[in-house]
Image: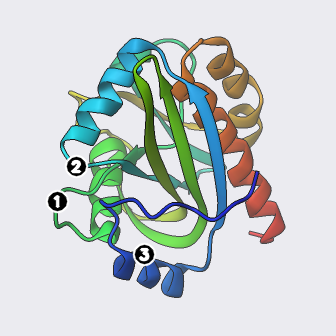
């Protein structure tokens, strides 16, 4: 359901306004998902360090989109859009470029701000707010070889149809709240892309 996105403390309002001015006004959506204990711990650790967001990029390439797989779900068939967060004081655009390079090996440029997703991470000890800034990006250099191999297990090109079909089904069947969220985010991204004629 659509609503005004929450402004979380770790996203600077001036930077956010600049993103909107340069890359367009995103559609704001809310989602709520029950996370497993190990997922909650990961989100909680990030939140305690002052980060409650990620920047997600859908990167068209070679007839499909760049997908990444992390070690904790290696060989599951699940490849999702790469994402990562800004370090303290790091501009959001530079963070997006750095994270995409680390996770995929590609140098990218942001093209369109598509979604501003607010997520309620529901845990046994309460709810943790999270936010995803979701962009369409383009490859401007590099090759598809993940640099951060400690975090990233593999990268590959996958089709839109597979991302919203087979992979989304695998995500929802995993029992992970994070994957339930990522399946929804992916479907909404492509709906918005169609609405924008991109």
Q: Is 151 left or right of 36, judged from the image as shown? A: left
Local secondary structure at mark 3: helix
Give the distance between the C-alpha atoms of the residues marked 3 and 1, in whole angstroms. 15 Å
In terms of sequence position, does the residue under pointer 3 or pointer 1 come before the other? 3
Q: Is 43 left or right of 124, judged from the image as shown? A: left
Marks 1 and 2 in Cβ contact (< 8 Å):
yes
In terms of sequence position, does the residue under pointer 3 or pointer 2 come before the other? 3
Q: Position of residue 176 (x, y in %)?
A: 54, 17
Q: Is residue 6 visible?
A: yes
Give the distance between the C-alpha atoms of the residues marked 3 and 2, in whole angstroms. 17 Å
**Res. 14 image quadrant:** bottom left
Q: Which callout, 3 or 2, points to the residue nearer the camera?
A: 2
Q: Could you classify mark 2 by the number of other residues whose Cα lies within 10 Å: few (under 14), some (14-19), or many (20 or more)? A: few
Give the distance between the C-alpha atoms of the residues marked 1 and 2, in whole angstroms. 8 Å
Residue under circle 1? 88
Q: Position of residue 54 (x, y in %)?
A: 40, 50
Residue under circle 3? 16
Q: Residue at x 20, y 66 (%)?
A: 90
Q: Position of residue 194 (x, y in %)?
A: 81, 62
Residue 50: mark in rendering: 2
Q: Is 178 left or right of 115, judged from the image as shown? A: left
């Amino acid at each position: 359901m659509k609503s005004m996105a929450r402004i979380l403390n770790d996203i600077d309002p001036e930077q956010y306004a600049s993103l909107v001015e340069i890359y367009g006004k995103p559609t704001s959506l809310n989602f709520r998902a029950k996370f497993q204990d190990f997922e909650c711990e990961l989100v909680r650790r990030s939140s305690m360090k002052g980060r409650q967001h990620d920047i997600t990029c859908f990167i068209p390439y070679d007839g499909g989109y760049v997908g990444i797989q992390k070690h904790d779900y290696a060989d599951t068939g699940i490849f999702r859009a790469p994402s990562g967060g800004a370090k303290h004081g790091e501009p959001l655009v530079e963070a997006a470029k750095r994270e995409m390079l680390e996770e995929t090996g590609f140098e990218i440029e942001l093209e369109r701000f598509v979604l501003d997703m607010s997520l309620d991470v529901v845990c046994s000890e309460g709810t943790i707010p999270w936010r995803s800034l979701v962009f369409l990006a383009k490859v401007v250099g590099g090759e598809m070889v993940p640099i951060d191999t400690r975090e990233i297990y593999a990268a590959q090109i996958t089709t839109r149809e597979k991302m919203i079909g087979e992979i989304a089904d695998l995500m929802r069947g995993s029992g992970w709240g994070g994957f339930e969220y990522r399946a929804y985010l992916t479907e909404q991204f492509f709906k918005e892309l169609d609405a924008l004629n991109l």
